[in-house]
Amino acid sequence: MVAVCFYFQVHQPYRMRKYPVFDIGRNSDYFDHAKNAEIMRKVADKCYLPANRAILDMIKHTGGKFKASYSISGIALDQFEEYAPEVLKSFQELMETGCVEMLDETYYHSMSFLYSRREFRRQVEMHRKKIKELFDYEPKVFRNTELVYNNQLAYNVEQMGYSGVLAEGAERVLEWRSPNYVYRPKGTKKIRLLLKNYKLSDDIAFRFSERSWKEWPLTADKFAHWVSAVNGAGNTVNLFMDYETFGEHQWEASGIFNFLRHLPYEILKHPDNTFMTPSEVLEAFEPAAELDVPHVVSWADVERDLSAWLGNPMQKAAAEALYRLEDQVHKAQDKKLLEDWRKLQTADHLYYMCTKWFNDGDVHKYFNVYDRPHDSYIAFMNVLTDFQIRLKKLGAPIAAPAVCPACMKPVQPTA
């Protein structure tokens, strides 16, 4: 028996505007509201609405045999409410089928686990509360931002009451093992680990419209044959990907929606195939082994590490300067200040500073308003300087200065 477990990440950041040095101390509106509304509407029309219709149709036409799961960042949910309420309604309709599972994550799609366990827990609790409010559901499974994972993450989310956690099935983690089994994270007692089958997932997410790929065109029956081949060599095929794969990363003209609509029927032709949500997989199968992941892994790029967000001095300086302000932000007891600080934690801001393959790679340019990674860094540090001025005006002591974008040296903000 092979259970196909679909998991989709749904996320849109609050994108910052191009914040010039001249605005420091004069304009504390950091985000491009018009651009955020425009992008949300665009992705809603190209991806979220048609993909949700397709998923709902598949659930109905298979008599509930097709199942899927989602984690939707808190700030994506906020933007649904603000810019695209029909998208939120369509996700609620999916949940009402009983064939869809919602997962928890950090509210602001942040890297907080790496810098502040207190902030991490606060954001997860915020997300759990939001999911309960909008969907009347309490998630049992957790996925961290961009599948950032190690043993410590599993231990922490087990302490928070989750029964399962997702991670990337990176080869350096698995070694000779297969991602097609349930595992037990080292150092935990009850929580279980589901690993992404990145080869099959990426065939859809990244290679589907790649004409130079030897398997192009990818058809539903071909992919179903690959899935069926796992029978006898695994219990679950975990297909984890960005939801924007459907209609945005892979345009409708590529045939991606036709592929999606036909896939369940082709997979279910094999009598031993089924679809399960993550919770159902965890209930159906015992862990095959303990898995030790002492070092952090993610699902980004070929390295599957943190280099997409923290791979250069700009990214590290920006993240450290931001999280260094945690105590001062909470002491200020200002709701707007806290909200802005948390929106600045969204991992996308660090991603836009990535310099890996920037000249020949498009992935780091996706909906990026900056022409260069350095421009993103400069704008971010300008914002942090203004942010510290606001802290100072509220009487909060400044523990450490921001960093000059030009020379990378500390700069003390002045009112």
Image: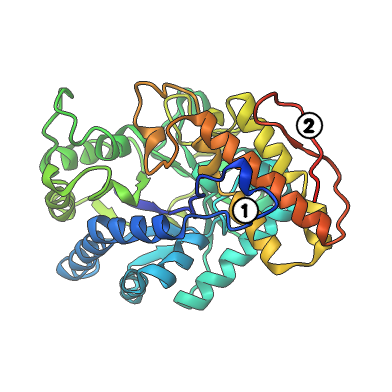
| Residue 68 placement (x, y as % from top left) | 33, 59
Q: Nearer the viewer, mark 1 or mark 2?
A: 2
Left or right of residue 308, residue 4 in this image: left
Q: Earlier in the sequence, mark 1 or mark 2?
A: 1
Task: State the residue position of label 1.
Answer: 190
Left or right of residue 37, residue 291 in this image: right
Left or right of residue 301, residue 43 in this image: left
Whether residue 188 is visible here, answered yes or no, is no
Query: What residue is at 15 percent from the left and 49 percent from the top?
Result: 252
Query: What residue is at 25 percent from the left and 64 percent from the top?
Result: 49
Q: Is residue 349 above or below residue 257?
A: above
| Residue 275 placement (x, y as % from top left) | 29, 56
Task: State the residue position of label 2.
Answer: 410
**10 Å neighbourhood of mark 1: few (<14), some, or many (≥20)?**
some
Q: Quadrant of residue 27?
A: bottom right
* Pointer 1 with pointer 2, Cβ within 8 A: no
Q: Quadrant of residue 217?
A: top left
Question: Does dot 2 land on a helix, a strand or a loop?
Answer: strand
Q: Quadrant of residue 284?
A: bottom left
Query: Rounded to the nearest whole Å, what is the CA distance between mark 1 and mark 2?
Result: 46 Å
Query: What residue is at 72 percent from the left and 37 percent from the top?
Result: 320
Question: Does dot 1 land on a helix, a strand or a loop?
Answer: loop
**10 Å neighbourhood of mark 2: few (<14), some, or many (≥20)?**
few
Name the colouring of the figure: rainbow
Q: How many numbered markers are drawn? A: 2
Say the numbered circle drawn on residue 146: none
| Residue 7 placement (x, y as % from top left) | 38, 52
Q: Is residue 300 above or below residue 146?
A: above
Q: Amino acid at mark 1?
A: Lys
Query: What residue is at 86 percent from the left and 57 percent from the top?
Result: 396
